[in-house]
């Protein structure tokens, strides 16, 4: 019975992580409202926020931020949600994360370093406010 419970929990976690990847904010809200933590992570350390940011879902990002997701939590590769959004050049996500207080210098490489390397001038402007 324990093995089945463990398998069911793993399958549920995968479904919830997929909701973040897909930008399914309403369904994700139901799970978080039922007690699933906003900082749920996959085996690689990617949080729900990282997955939503990396896949370009600004409304899901905003919801997760409002739900208490850690803006600057890095994954096992040292990447931040802001760095992921800058890498993918998802400017609406970058804008939401910066407005919420994400640190552009967190991570390896940092979001600022990624922006410089890929000449993401608009992302640099959003992160520096200039």
Image (cartoon, grey):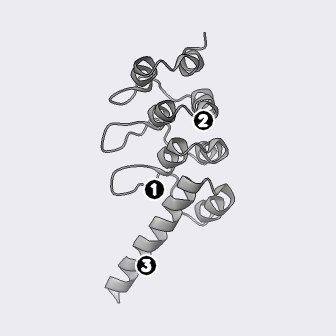
- In space, the residues marked 2 and 3 are separated at their CA atoms by 32 Å
Q: At 50% from the left edge and 51% from the top edge, which residue is drawn?
A: 48
Q: Are marks 1 and 3 in contact (CB under 8 Å)?
A: no
The reply to whether dot 2 and dot 3 touch (C-beta < 8 Å) is no
The residue tagged 1 is 40
Judging depth in this view, the residue of 125 and 100 nearest the camera is 125
Secondary structure found at label 2: helix
Task: Find disc 3 in the rendering and name its residue.
Answer: 8
How far across and how far down the image is residue 56, in percent?
58, 42
| Rendered image: mark on residue 3 | none
Number of marks: 3
Instruction: Name the spot of residue 42 as percent of width and height, x first.
Output: 39, 57
Mark 2 or 3, nearer chain start: 3
Indicate the secondary structure of the residue bearing disc 3: helix
Q: Residues within 10 Å of mark 3 (few under 14, many from 20)?
A: few
Image point (53%, 54%), residue name: 21
Confirm or deny contact between disc 2 and disc 1 (CB under 8 A).
no
Residue drawn at the location 57% of the way across and 34% of the way down: 90
Residue 118 found in image quarter: top left
Q: Nearer the viewer, residue 52 or 55?
A: 55
- Left or right: 110 in relation to 33: left
Side (left or right) of 54 relative to 23: left
Q: Quadrant of residue 107?
A: top left
Q: Is residue 66 left or right of residue 2?
A: right
Q: CA distance from mark 1 to mark 3?
A: 16 Å
Label 1 sits on a secondary structure element that is: loop
Where in the figure is residue 53, as x and y percent of width and height?
A: 53, 42
Label ID, residue 93: 2
User: Could you tell me which quadrant the N terminus lies in?
Assistant: bottom left
């Amino acid at each position: 019975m324990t093995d089945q419970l463990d398998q069911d929990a793993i399958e549920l976690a995968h479904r919830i992580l997929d909701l973040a990847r897909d930008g399914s904010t309403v369904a994700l809200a139901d799970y978080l409202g039922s007690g699933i933590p906003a900082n749920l992570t996959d085996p690689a350390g990617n949080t729900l926020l990282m997955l939503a940011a990396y896949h370009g879902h600004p409304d899901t990002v905003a919801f997760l931020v409002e739900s208490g997701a850690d803006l600057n939590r890095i994954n096992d590769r040292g990447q931040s949600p802001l760095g992921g959004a800058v890498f993918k050049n998802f400017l609406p996500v970058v804008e939401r994360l910066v407005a919420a207080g994400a640190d552009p210098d967190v991570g390896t490489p940092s979001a600022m370093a990624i922006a410089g390397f890929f000449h993401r001038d608009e992302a640099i402007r959003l992160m520096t406010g200039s």
